[in-house]
Structures are given as C-alpha cells and as structure tokens.
Image: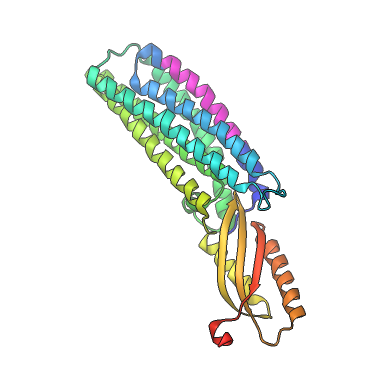
C-alpha cells in the first residue's frame, strides 16, 4: 500500500476547509439554542463544535507546514511538523470539548436545571446533522477513493494513513454525528420525563465520546512523531522491488519511517551478488532508487548500504 502526497494534499486541504466552515456555523447555532433552552447537552455540543473549529484551524496549519520543502537546516523536510500540529489539534478537542462537556453535564446532574423552550434546539440539531453529514460525506469520499487505489478497506486506511488531516476530519465528523444523536436523545428523555437528568447524562456521554476520539488521534500522532514505519503492504512492495534487481542477492535489513503525511524514508542493507563490480553496484543502487520512486511516489528518500550476509562474510 502507498500514499500519494501530491494527490492527497490538495484534497485534504479542501476537506479541512469544508469541515471548518461547517463547524463554525454549527457552533454559533448550538450556542444560541443552548442558551435559550438551558440544555447542558446543547451547550456541550456548542463546545464540541467550537473545539472542532479550533481543530480545523490547527489542521490547516498542519497541512501548510508539512508541505514546506526541505532546506539546509531541515534536510528531511518539514513533514513531521504536520504531526505536531495535528497533535495540538487533538489536545484542543480533549481539553476544549471533552473537558467542558463532562464537567457541565456533571453539574447539571448534581444540581438540576429547568429546561426552557426545546424547539430551537431540535431544529439546530437537525440542521447540524445535515451539515455534519455533508462534511463527513466529503471526507469519506476522499477516504474511499484512496482506499480503492490502495486496495484496502476504508476503515483500515483511516487507521494506518499518515494523512493526519484526513484522519482527524473523519474521526471528528463521525464523533459529531454520534454526539448529535446523543444530544437529541438526552433532550427527548428530559422532555418526556420532566427531569434534566437525561440531558446531563447526554452531556457527559458527549464528553466521553470526544475523549475517546481525542485519545485515539493523540496516540496515532504520537506514533508518527516517534518514527512509525510504513504500512506492511508498502514494505512488502519495496522489498520486492529490491529483490527484483538482478545484482541483488538478498535484503539483509529493511527499515522505513514516515517522515511526513504521505512521505516515507527507506533505508536498506543489501547483499549484492559476488560477481557484481563496484561500478555495477553503483548502477544497481541508482536503478533501484529510480524504480522505488516511480512505483511508490510516497517514497521520498532512499539510502542503500551494500552489506554481505553473515554466511557470505564468514
């Protein structure tokens, strides 16, 4: 499996812009409806959308920063800066969305609040669901197109992709749609029973949902920052290209690392055939470099080290 940064970067930017505009409009509408109704779940949803808006702004920075070309001080490029900003976006969701929702929900459960007119809240939830669904549909279309190109299931792709912007939008929009259903259920429960308990429980549930999404994204970005290897399918393809070179006897060791969204570094120790001359080894290394970049556009840097196997050296 491979990722094509040149093709996905613009798509990810468009996906983030759509999600950000949707979240800003929804946050304002939810805030007004929450103040009118006094619903903790609605105010939690407003905090959720506000946190998502901040997240989209940080993801825009991530997309822009990760696309900067390499320079003398950063010879491997700025790809990992995208992981840093995506990590900050996940933390914003954790603190701004999950923290507010849980604390506000617990306060309503313990103190109890009388709910006001819920009609505006229902209307805002319905409109928000449509807008969030459209945003999620755009992100999922991009995800499904990439998954078809890589011949993997979209769910697997969203787990292993280094496109942190796409991953964040998919997770956040899915959490937003689920949160809207939870908020609607909490409002309905409180309306039918006359107790604000259900609204408070809905607020806490929304906070826990955001907590799960944020922790998942933090874990994924932390793995990329530490130095995550390329997907196994891509490593298998790289190894096959190396072994297909006539001068190559064996691949002693193959190491890969994601150095940015859709960018991979390849380092390999190669056992070349004994009859290969020094000039032949140089030509073979150059040919392997070209083939890897041609067949896997995600490969940005290739380092090959001629290394005999233990048996050959003995």
**Which of 260/237 is in front?**
260
Q: What sort of colour scheme is used for the picture?
A: rainbow
In this orientation, which residue lies closer to the viewer: 1 or 245? 245
Q: Which one is nearer the viewer's eye here, 135 or 220? A: 220
Residue at image point 50% right, 49% down: 158
In the figure, 223 relative to 165: above or below?
Answer: below
Give the x, y percent position of residue 39.
34, 18
Where residue 5 appears, as percent x and y from the top left, is 64, 50
Query: What residue lies at 59% left-to-right and 43% top-to-bottom?
Result: 81
The answer to whether one can see residue 117 in this image is yes
Residue pictured at 70% horizontal, 66% vertical: 289
Rendered-image quadrant of the N terminus:
bottom right
Q: Is residue 312 left or right of residue 287?
A: left
> Is residue 251 shown in magenta?
no
Q: Is residue 3 left or right of residue 212?
A: right
Please report the residue visible at 49 percent of the width from the left and 23 percent of the height from the top: 26
Location of residue 231 in the rendering, given as x and y in whole percent from the top left corner: 52, 59
Give the magenta-colored segment's residue range.
14-33
């Amino acid at each position: 499996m491979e990722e094509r940064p040149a093709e996905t970067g613009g798509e990810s930017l468009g996906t983030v812009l759509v999600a950000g505009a949707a979240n800003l409009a929804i946050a304002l509408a939810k805030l007004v409806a929450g103040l009118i109704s006094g619903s903790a779940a609605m105010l939690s949803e407003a905090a959720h959308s506000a946190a998502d808006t901040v997240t989209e702004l940080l993801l825009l920075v991530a997309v822009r920063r990760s696309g900067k070309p390499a320079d003398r001080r950063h010879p491997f490029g700025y790809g990992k800066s995208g992981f840093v900003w995506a990590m900050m976006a996940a933390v914003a969701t954790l603190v701004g969305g999950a923290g507010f929702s849980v604390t506000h929900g617990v306060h309503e459960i313990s103190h109890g609040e009388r709910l006001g007119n819920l009609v505006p809240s229902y209307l805002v939830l319905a409109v928000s669901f449509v807008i969030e669904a459209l945003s999620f549909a755009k992100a999922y279309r991009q995800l499904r197109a990439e998954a078809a190109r890589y011949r993997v299931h979209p769910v697997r792709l969203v787990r292993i992709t280094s496109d942190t912007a796409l991953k964040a939008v998919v997770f956040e929009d899915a959490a937003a749609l689920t949160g809207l259903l939870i908020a609607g259920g909490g409002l309905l429960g409180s309306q039918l029973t006359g107790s604000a308990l259900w609204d408070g429980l809905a607020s806490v549930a929304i906070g826990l949902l955001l907590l799960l999404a944020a922790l998942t994204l933090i874990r994924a970005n932390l793995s990329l920052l530490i130095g995550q290897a390329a997907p196994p399918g891509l490593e298998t393809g790289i190894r096959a290209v190396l072994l297909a070179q006539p001068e190559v006897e064996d691949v002693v060791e193959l190491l890969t690392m994601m150095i940015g969204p859709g960018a991979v570094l390849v380092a390999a120790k190669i056992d070349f055939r004994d009859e290969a001359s020094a000039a032949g080894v140089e030509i073979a290394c150059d040919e392997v470099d070209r083939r890897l970049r041609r067949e896997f556009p995600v490969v940005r840097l290739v380092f090959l080290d001629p290394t005999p196997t233990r048996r050959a050296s003995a």
